[in-house]
Image: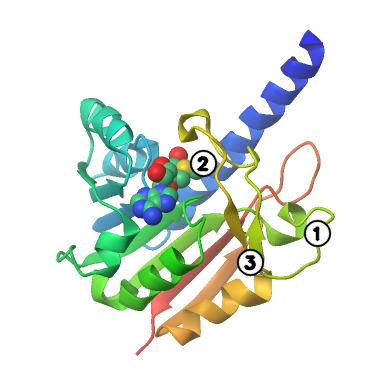
Amino acid sequence: MPWIAAVRERQIESRRLVTDRAIVEATLGRSPRSVLDLGCGEGWLARALAATGIAVIGIDAIPALIEQARRAGGGDFRVMSYEDVAAGRLSEPVDAVVCNFALLGNESVAGLFGVIRSLLNPHGSLLIQTLHPAIACGDHPYQDGWRKGSWAGFNADFGDPAPWYFRTLESWIKLFPEHGLRLLEMREPLHPQTQKPASVIFIAQVAD
Ligand SMILES: C[S@@+](CC[C@H](N)C(=O)[O-])C[C@H]1O[C@@H](n2cnc3c(N)ncnc32)[C@H](O)[C@@H]1O
C-alpha cells in the first residue's frame, strides 16, 4: 500500500539524515586535512568533507560509481578494490581513513586492517560507521558469520543484495588493538522515530 511505502521512505530518509550527519561530524571532529574514503560509492561523503576544505581520495571497486563521483567532483576518485589497497597500491598517507557502511566482508576487512597503519599519518584516525550489531542481528545467533544479503543499510546504488559478514560488537572492538590502533570512542546515533541505534561509529587512532 502506498502509505506503507511513504512511511518506509520517510524512515529511510530520517535514518540517512541521522547517519550521514553522524559520520560527517565524527570525521570533522578529528580535524583531518586529508581523508581516504574507502568504499566511497557515488561520493557524497567525499563531497561533504571536501566542501570544508579537506583533500579527499575516494576509492571504490565499482567503476560506474566512481564515474558518478568524478562527474560530481569534490575528490580524487579512483577505481580500486580493498584487495588492491591491502596489496599496498595506495601510497599517500592521510590524516583519516573513513569507511561508511562499506565494510561488508571478512577477509577483505582483515586485509584492510592489515595495512591501515601504513595508510595513516602518525596519530591518524580510522572512522567506521556500520550497522549496529544488536539491531542487525535480528533472530540469528549473536555470533560472527556470513549472512544472506539484505537491503537494510544499503543504498539503491548497491545492486543485488550481496552476502555480508556479521560481526558482534566484541569482535569489532578487538580488531583495533590487534592492528596497532587505539579505540577512542564508540557512538550509537539514535533513529529519531524508533529511538534505537541507527548505526554504530567507531573512532580509533594510530597507537604510539
Ligand atoms: C553500502 S555502499 C556505501 C557507499 C558509501 N560509503 C556511502 O556512504 O554511500 C558500500 C560500498 O562499498 C564498496 N565496496 C564493497 N566491497 C568493496 C571492495 N572489496 N573493494 C572496493 N569497494 C568495495 C561498494 O562498491 C559500495 O559502493
Q: Is residue 207 left or right of residue 17?
A: left
Q: Which mark, by number, is residue 20?
A: 2
Task: From the image, tell me which residue sits under label 3.
Answer: 167
Residue 101 percent location from the top left of the image? 51, 50
Q: Is residue 73 visible?
A: yes
Q: CA distance from mark 1 to mark 2?
A: 27 Å
Eye-nearest disc, 2 or 3: 3
Eye-nearest disc, 3 or 1: 1
Given the current orientation, which residue lies at the most extreme bottom position?
208
**Who is closer to the viewer here, 134 or 137?**
137
Are dots 1 and 2 in contact, CB under 8 Å? no
**Who is closer to the viewer here, 103 or 76?**
103
Residue 188 percent location from the top left of the image? 66, 58
**Who is closer to the viewer here, 178 or 29?**
178
Q: Is residue 39 left or right of residue 33?
A: right
Residue 64 percent location from the top left of the image? 30, 31
Labels 2 and 3: the sequence-earlier one: 2
Amino acid on which disc 1 is placed = His
| The CB of the residue at mark 2 lies under 8 Å from ligand 1 | yes
Q: What residue sits 39% from the left and 63% below the top?
A: 30
Which quarter of the picture shows residue 120? bottom left
Labels 1 and 2: the sequence-earlier one: 2
Eye-nearest disc, 1 or 2: 1
| The CB of the residue at mark 1 lies under 8 Å from ligand 1 | no
Q: Is residue 140 left or right of residue 107?
A: right
Which structural element holds mark 2? helix
| The CB of the residue at mark 3 lies under 8 Å from ligand 1 | no
Task: From the image, tell me which residue sits under label 1.
Answer: 140
